[in-house]
């Protein structure tokens, strides 16, 4: 098969991501128990499926039932940023009780995407530390994709105002690499359910 004829999504494997050859895809899934992957005819379709996540993709295909309402016993995470870049903070809130379980920041200079990424990693590590199993909701496609890829693809420059935040990003990336997890990360359906409970209410 000529390179680029199909695009391959690896949701669960050695290095999740989107690949343009079967050989690259196969290298990520061979010998991996429970690997999740699929071929797509275009790069656009593959990227959309990867960012949506495996569960959401299956629901769209009709192989899993759609969620008509969020799971109440769950954690939601969100970030707020005044400007881009600007003052940024993030937090986690239990969906059922609306209780805030963590809040970090504000950082003097960050981006919303960095906050969404860090909020997810913080939530995953918190649940893992306390051996709690529940879904984690985020309304950020980018944040979810960065966590799945174990890499925060920010272009925020390192300077005095961003040094502490970028050090935290590096620690979060290292934690994802060093701590295998099976977190149930789900996209919050804002259109159907309204704002995510962790929203800061500053729109």
Image (spheres, rainbow, N blue to C red):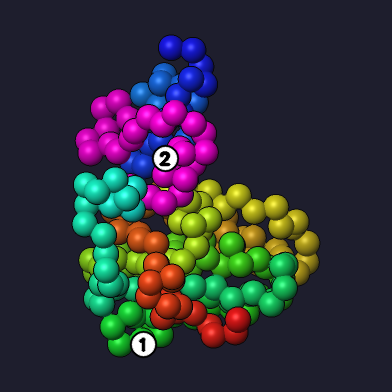
Instruction: Give the left or right position of residue 144, taking residue 75 as reference.
Output: right
Q: Could you tell me residue 112's position as x and y percent?
A: 61, 67
Q: Could you tell me residue 146's position as x and y percent?
A: 51, 52
Q: Secondary structure at mark 2?
A: loop
Q: Residues within 10 Å of mark 2 (few under 14, many from 20)?
A: many
For residue 3, say whether it is visible. Answer: yes
* Nearest the eye: 7 or 184: 7
Q: Which mark is residue 7?
A: none
Q: Which residue is mark 2?
A: 16
Quarter holding the N terminus is top left
* Nearest the eye: 40 or 177: 40
Q: Could you tell me residue 173's position as x and y percent?
A: 51, 53
For residue 180, say whether it is visible. Answer: no
* Residues under numbered marks 2 and 1 in contact, where contact means CB atoms less than 8 Å apart: no
Reading the chain from its start, which is encountered first: label 2 or label 1? 2
Which residues are the magenta region?
29-55
* Vertical order, 159 against 107 (above or below): above
Q: Residue at x 35, y 59 (%)?
A: 185
In terms of image quadrants, where is residue 79? bottom right
Q: Which residue is mark 1?
A: 99
Q: Could you tell me residue 124's position as x and y percent?
A: 37, 63
Quarter holding the C terminus is bottom right
In terms of image quadrants, where is residue 191? bottom left
Q: Residue at x 36, y 42 (%)?
A: 11
* Vertical order, 176 against 130 (above or below): above
């Amino acid at each position: 098969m000529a390179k680029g004829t199909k695009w391959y999504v690896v949701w669960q494997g050695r290095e999740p991501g989107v690949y343009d050859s079967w050989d690259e895809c196969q290298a990520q899934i061979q010998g991996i128990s429970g690997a999740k992957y699929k071929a797509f005819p275009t790069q656009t379709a593959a990227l959309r499926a990867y960012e949506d996540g495996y569960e959401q993709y299956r629901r769209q295909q009709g192989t899993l039932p759609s969620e008509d309402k969020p799971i109440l016993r769950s954690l939601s995470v969100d970030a707020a940023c005044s400007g881009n870049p600007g003052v940024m903070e993030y937090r986690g809130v239990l969906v059922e009780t609306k209780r805030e379980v963590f809040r970090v920041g504000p950082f003097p200079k960050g981006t919303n995407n960095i906050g969404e990424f860090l909020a997810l990693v913080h939530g995953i590590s918190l649940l893992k530390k306390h051996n709690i199993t529940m879904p984690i909701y985020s309304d950020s496609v980018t944040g979810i994709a960065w966590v799945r890829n174990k890499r925060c693809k920010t272009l925020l420059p390192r300077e005095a105002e961003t040094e502490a935040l970028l050090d935290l990003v590096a620690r979060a990336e290292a934690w994802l690499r060093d701590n295998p997890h099976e977190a149930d990360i789900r996209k919050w359906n804002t259109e159907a359910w309204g704002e995510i409970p962790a929203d800061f209410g500053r729109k």
